Image (cartoon, helix red, strand yellow):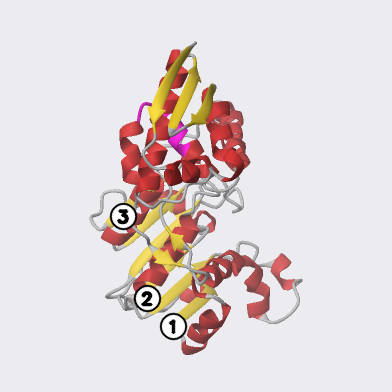
């Protein structure tokens, strides 16, 4: 056992880092395996030497973020600890990023992980960006935030959000209402993100003016989309023909973001995912960025990250043992 004493300059930063009722402190103690006591502007960290060193680095990293105005929550704490345990504590300073946009309730939207920061920078610096990763990594939410920011800055005139309605055949027909009512359930995640950014009243105003369009992918055929920020969500469920059709809608002054999770393809078994194919087709083209987010970038409940990691571990032997399919030579 060893003990390390850390001097604390500003107690308000400690309050931010430790959280309400010291809930973040309990996470540090549990995840790293130490005991932390706060006494008279000092922190006493006790435990095994390596654990104490990790805890000190994690707390220093969190204090540096707090000093730069970042709000520390449980997700931040777990992510910082993960970086420290991986020996990447030097990257912590990069997490204090710029605000992408402000929501209708005044909440700043920022990248919370290194993967998200890379993704946001790619959207800013490329005409077409592919964001690929599991649920909860903020692919759609950050893309919508970037779209709203571009619209507010008058960099684009329209925001167009679309996604494929995979069950657009028999099952869709049983849903009540007209065609728009039938496809609305598929577009609900996009509505939710827009409501959060703009508020329901502003969203409705822009929708009526034609500045915002939320529509199924089939509605994109035959159009050229100029001065628009276009987001294709759930792109793993596009066919190769749909993906090619969508990409060729790009007009002057427009930007495209394509998001999807190649582990959750709902297409029939004989259909090739347009997203999986486009990753290979477009990988070497300038102006197109491909960002791969991982379970480390999950910003939902901590259990979501553990669930994704458990499924990856479970499915890896099955995928590695799957028979390879060889094409017959002509």
Q: Position of residue 252 (x, y in %)?
A: 27, 75
Residue that extends furthest to the front in the rendered view of this protein: 40
Give above or below for 146 relative to 44.
below
Q: CA distance from mark 1 to mark 3?
A: 24 Å
Residue at numbered disc 2: 151
At a point 57% along the width and 70% down the height, the residue shown is 191
Tell me the magenta residue range. Answer: 79-88
For residue 228, side relative to residue 274 (left or right) = left
Residue in the picture at 40% in, 69% down: 147
Q: Which mark is residue 211?
A: 1
Identify whether 227 is placed above or below 37.
below
Left or right: residue 220 versus residue 99 is right
Where does the image place residue 320, in percent across and percent down from the top left? 52, 27
Q: Residues within 10 Å of mark 2 (few under 14, many from 20)?
A: some
Side of 123 relative to 73 (left or right) = left
Name the N-terminal-most of marks 2 and 3. 3
323 vs 270: above or below: above
> Of the residues under marks 1 and 3, which one precedes in the sequence?
3
Kind of element beneath mark 3? helix
Residue 119 visible (yes or no): yes
Q: Callout 1: helix, strand or loop?
A: loop
Given the current orientation, which residue lies at the most extreme left position?
286
Badge 1 vs badge 2, beta-carbon distance below 8 Å: yes
What residue is disc 3 on?
121
Q: Secondary structure at mark 2?
A: helix
């Amino acid at each position: 056992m060893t003990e390390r004493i850390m001097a604390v300059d500003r107690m308000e930063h400690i309050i931010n880092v430790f959280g309400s009722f010291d809930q973040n402190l309990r996470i540090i103690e549990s995840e790293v395996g130490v005991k932390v006591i706060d006494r008279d502007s000092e922190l006493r960290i006790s435990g095994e030497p390596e654990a104490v060193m990790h805890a000190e680095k994690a707390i220093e990293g969190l204090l540096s973020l707090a000093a730069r105005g970042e709000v520390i929550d449980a997700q931040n704490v777990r992510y910082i600890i993960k970086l420290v345990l991986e020996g990447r504590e030097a990257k912590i300073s990069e997490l204090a990023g710029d605000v992408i946009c402000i929501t209708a309730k005044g909440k700043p939207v920022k990248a919370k992980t290194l993967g998200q920061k890379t993704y946001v920078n790619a959207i800013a610096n490329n005409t077409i960006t592919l964001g690929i990763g599991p649920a909860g990594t903020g692919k759609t939410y950050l893309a919508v935030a970037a779209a709203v920011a571009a619209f507010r800055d008058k960099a684009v005139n329209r925001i167009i959000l679309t996604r494929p309605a995979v069950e657009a055949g028999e099952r869709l027909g049983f849903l009540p209402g007209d065609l728009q009512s039938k496809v609305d359930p598929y577009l609900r995640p996009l509505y939710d993100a827009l409501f959060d950014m703009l508020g329901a009243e502003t969203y409705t105003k822009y929708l009526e003016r034609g500045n915002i369009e939320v529509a199924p992918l089939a509605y994109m055929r035959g159009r050229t989309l100029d001065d628009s920020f276009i987001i294709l969500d759930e792109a793993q469920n596009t066919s190769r023909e749909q993906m090619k059709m969508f990409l060729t809608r790009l007009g002057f002054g427009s930007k495209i973001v394509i998001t999807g999770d190649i582990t959750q393809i709902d297409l029939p078994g004989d259909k090739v995912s347009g997203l999986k194919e486009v990753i290979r087709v477009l990988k070497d083209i300038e102006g197109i960025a491909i960002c791969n987010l991982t379970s480390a970038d999950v910003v939902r409940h901590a259990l979501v990250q553990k669930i994704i990691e458990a499924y990856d571990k479970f499915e890896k032997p099955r995928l590695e043992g799957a028979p390879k399919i060889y094409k017959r030579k002509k």
